[in-house]
Image (spheres, rainbow, N blue to C red):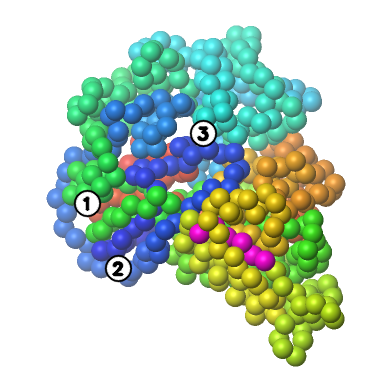
Amino acid sequence: MRARLPALLLSGALLLCCAACAPETAEETPVPTTPAPVQTAEQTQPQIEQREFVLPCYAAESFHPITGGNRTNLTLAPLMYEGLYELDQSFTPSPVLCASALTDETGLIWTFTLREGITFSDGSLLTASDVVYSLQLAMGENTPYAGRFSGVAGIAAGEGNTVVITLTAPNGALPALLDIPIVRETGGTPLGTGPYVLTGEGDSLALEARTGWWRGEEVPLEHIPLYDVREADGMIHAFDTQDISMVALDITGSNALGYSGTYEVWDYATSVMLYIGYNTASGPCAGQTLRRALSYGYERSAVTKSILSQHARAAALPVSPVSPLYDEALAGTLEYAPQTAEQLLEEAGWSLGADGLRTNGWQNLSLRFIVNTDNTYKVSAAEYLAQGLEKLGVAVQLDKLAWEDYVAALAAGEFDLYLGEVKLTGDFDLTALIAPEGTLNYGGYSDADAQTLLAAFRAAGEGQRETAASALYARLAETAPFTPICFKNWSVLTHWGSLTGLSPTQQNVFYGLTGWKMG
């Protein structure tokens, strides 16, 4: 989505903070602190002096694309490094350094054959050993990619120019997890196979287009200076004064930074899901019919449009609506429907009393709903969703907790409902949320049929995955361990008229770089 934000305070993550910089182990994370900006009607485009295209960096910090911890520097990684695969805007993987992939009959052993003749920026050939080293490094506990390897038993070089990955359970979507940068260590910033190479030092740092890039495509810029940012305020000033040309951020995220002025905004889909989780082990929400009733009482479109200012996509299924896995027909049966919610509440034994509250004859239907206060957007969303349930006659005690107290309440099962946010991996695996041992299964959900369908979904290959996904999602809609609300969008800001042709993705805001037009 491309839009204009004039003279507004924008809040978001650190400058050029992208998904590659944040762990993808489906984990709860605290997230926004100021109201989302409201996009306004078209205005006359301001006349802006064209300046050199410059990107920010922290010169004193590491530029390592796997072990580095600086978000701004990590966002530059796709300009210098490539993976076996890359994901497009619909989270569909396509091969990059990989020429082909095969699985054995068990689905546990994958063999990836590398493209021939690919070189690093120093001219040396890419080898299977480089890939093995990079993937094993990414398995480390403190990397953004560690969560992708929970089902990996081993990684090794195979015969010829191949890499063999052995799994503990079949995963037909393994390529969606392999957009991890491949590097060769040199003792400093590692070598990459991408279109640019890092040169200079300190204030003279720059990205230079390399000769002999294997793709043979022409990049729009031969030279990209890097602006050494030393503090957040300096970064904001540099963008506002056009010393920096581009900002990527989560407008409804944490670590708010303010940007004022008029910019073009390019939204892109993420795998970050906002959802309602239920205590399925105890309390009123242990009843499946009640959980299903509540799931029809959430007006998702109001959350995405009014509270998140359209920086999200409403979703009735636990997969991004831009993914081929999203079953529109099934989702249509799960949309906001207060009459269906009322009918199911009656079926669950909760009748509407004269005082407007639901009762089962001897007690009112009262639910404890918890949300963390580190994110004002989530608090606003929780308040709105609670009001929707109250209109159905459900008494809701909304407890707004500090992050530590929120996590403690989840761990202790001291809730009926909670508002959660999770960044799913590129294969949209739900193990953490619904497996009995899942790290995010705070509600104690356990359903044998769901586990069977989850295993079938994970094992399904191309051509079978959509059907397997729909079967799993239908079972989850029936048992309702959680209710999806939306998937967030993140954004790229550019100065008016400076760039066209952007098509950012969650892992690479420079995706489709060779199609960019400058000025």
Which of discs 3 and 2 lies nearer the camera? The answer is 3
In the picture, the disc for residue 240 is 1
Q: Position of residue 473 (x, y in %)?
A: 73, 53
Q: CA distance from mark 1 to mark 3?
A: 30 Å
Which residue shows up at 69% across the image and 58% down it?
Answer: 414
Mark 3 neighbour class, 10 Å CA radius: few under 14, some 14 to 19, many 20 or more: many
Q: CA distance from mark 3 to mark 2?
A: 39 Å
Q: Which residues fall within the magenta stretch?
A: 368-373
As drawn, is 250 to the left or to the right of 209? right
Report helix, strand or loop for mark 2. Answer: loop
Query: For residue 352, which quarter of the picture?
Result: bottom right
Q: Is residue 113 visible?
A: no
Which residue is labeled 3 in the image? 144
Q: Position of residue 266 (x, y in %)?
A: 38, 53
Q: Could you tell me the amino acid type at mark 1?
A: Asp
Which residue shows up at 63% across the image and 44% down it?
Answer: 428
Residue 372: say if magenta.
yes
Report helix, strand or loop for mark 1. Answer: helix
Q: Could you tell me the amino acid type at mark 2?
A: Glu
Total marks shown come to: 3
Q: Could you tell me the amino acid type at mark 3?
A: Pro
* The N terminus, quarter of image: bottom left
Query: For residue 301, which quarter of the picture?
Result: bottom right
Residue 335: say if magenta.
no
Q: Position of residue 372 (x, y in %)?
A: 54, 57
Q: Position of residue 518 (x, y in %)?
A: 25, 43
